[in-house]
Image: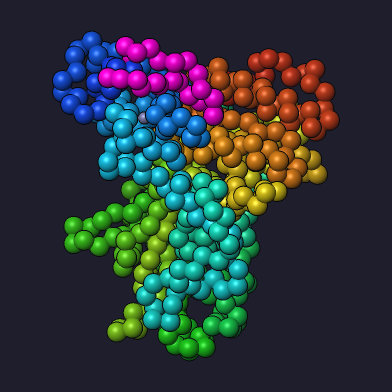
Amino acid sequence: MTGNILCEYWREQAGTLLTSVETQALVACFTGNREHSTQIEQATAAAILQRIHGRRWLACGCRPGVEPPPLMGARRHDTGALHINRFGATAHDPGCPFYVEMDERTSPAIAGGGPLKAITGSWLLATPRGRGVSTGTGGKPVGNRSWKPRMPRLGRLLMTILEAAGINRIEPTDVELAPTEAGRPARVRYARLLYDRLKTLDSYELDTRKAPGLTWRDLTCTYLGGLTRHCIQIRKLIPKFRMPEDAQGLFVGVVDGVRREPEGHWVLVRKSKGNGPTATVRILGEPKTSGQKAGAGIGPFWAIAQLASDPTTSRIEPTEAYLHPCYSKAFPVPVDSDLERRTLRLALEQVVYWQSKGVGVHVVKPVLDELTEDEAACRPDFELRLPGGPRFLIETMGYEDDDYMQCKVGTHARMRRLPGVAGLFEHWAGSEEAEGRDRLRRLLTVAVLGASGRYLADVEDDCCTSGDLKGKTEREGEI
Ligand SMILES: [Zn+2]
């Protein structure tokens, strides 16, 4: 080959050009007859991918003038080997050796969806036939500018409920530093059960027309072990529904995961502590997950299940379910991925530290979209809020999904213009380098204490987190 031009690329900026030897090695190894590549080419290609993996992408020059250019990232196979991942909105030119006929750029981000808005009105979503959730999405679509994938309606209802109960909002007094036992590392622990906030919904009427007078407490079960009994209870409530076929309810609770049984059906699973019994409840349909992001399939999860009547038996049963990851079973703040758990941990450790400096900072995990001034939907990963003060955004960064990352860097500029936002910080959660984490802690501390009007004289270089936590690994600080 060929007149191909590849350059390193990051954040809409082209960087170093690859040499023709490097380009040729990538072409030899990742297009066409790759079994004919030489050992030297293989070594060269592997070195390039190693160099860019987790840092940069490659842009191809086959579509001059088109923005963004065709992009490629280094992605690790299950085998451990790095290979090329074509992604982004622009395909290679059909004459380019990197062009592929069957587009491997399967991109949920590009598929997009409308803004993720709260479900208004009824929380009873089952259609009168009892099977299936109505699929209307509501809200006007905003083109492809929203990179968050569309969420099933049941998922939107879960987010609406978590927001209404405040489970995505952590107050400074919700976390504290656990007393250190001899020989054990210090850890942040929860001081209050966030789960209990669901009780604030107890008297909420789920649908004033279909089920007048019936409340969250009547129709919703929040403990998997009690779900089968709850379904029987709802059956007794059928006369209270305006139409018997409208009889339905909800399960909203934290589970360990889902499992497919040998007989083919799906069950929600919640394990007990120690040797207690494991609760499993059958779901008629296949549970949906938010699994668009890497690590989104790692539990524990918030689960929401539709309980609806089987028209033939008139029994109430879980028909459909949606799962969304949460931080931990004890502290079930929703998160979008496993990497976000690391960001949240860092934020919680900082909250404990700032609390010790007399500054109460709230952490919010936005679960619904916010519209920017140009009407684009965006949803920051995390927010730090000082009551009456500014908002600081923390974005979890990782390279598991190039497409997602490309969209993500594009949305940051817009997020910075959201009302009250005084800063946006990136947490490179995929990297285990303590140095980067400590730098972020310092930046956040300077921003937060500065915004709170406190002088920074007492903030030394190494004291931006509680001393007891310093030097501990991510795992040790488990909540
Ligand atoms: Zn190309």
Q: Where is residue 412 in the image (x, y as percent from the top left)?
A: 61, 37
In this rendering, would 102 be left or right of 13? left
Q: Quadrant of the N terminus?
A: top left
Q: What stretch is highlighted in magenta?
A: 1-22
* In the foreground, 183 or 373: 373
Q: Which residue does the image show at 36% across and 51% down from the upper left?
A: 257
Q: Where is residue 237 in the image (x, y as percent from the top left)?
A: 47, 83
Residue 50 versus residue 11 in the image, above or below: above
Residue 284 in sight: yes
In this rendering, would 286 be left or right of 164? left
Q: Which residue reaches farthest left?
A: 36
Q: Which residue does the image show at 42% across and 32% down from the upper left?
A: 63
In reply to whether residue 3 is colored magenta, the answer given is yes
Residue 358 versus residue 217 in the image, above or below: above
* In the foreground, 127 or 411: 411
Q: Which residue does the image show at 56% across and 20% down from the upper left?
A: 436
Q: Position of residue 433 (x, y in %)?
A: 49, 19
Ligand 1, by image quadrant, is top left
* In the foreground, 190 or 335: 335
In reply to whether residue 123 is colored magenta, the answer given is no
Q: Position of residue 351 (x, y in %)?
A: 66, 34
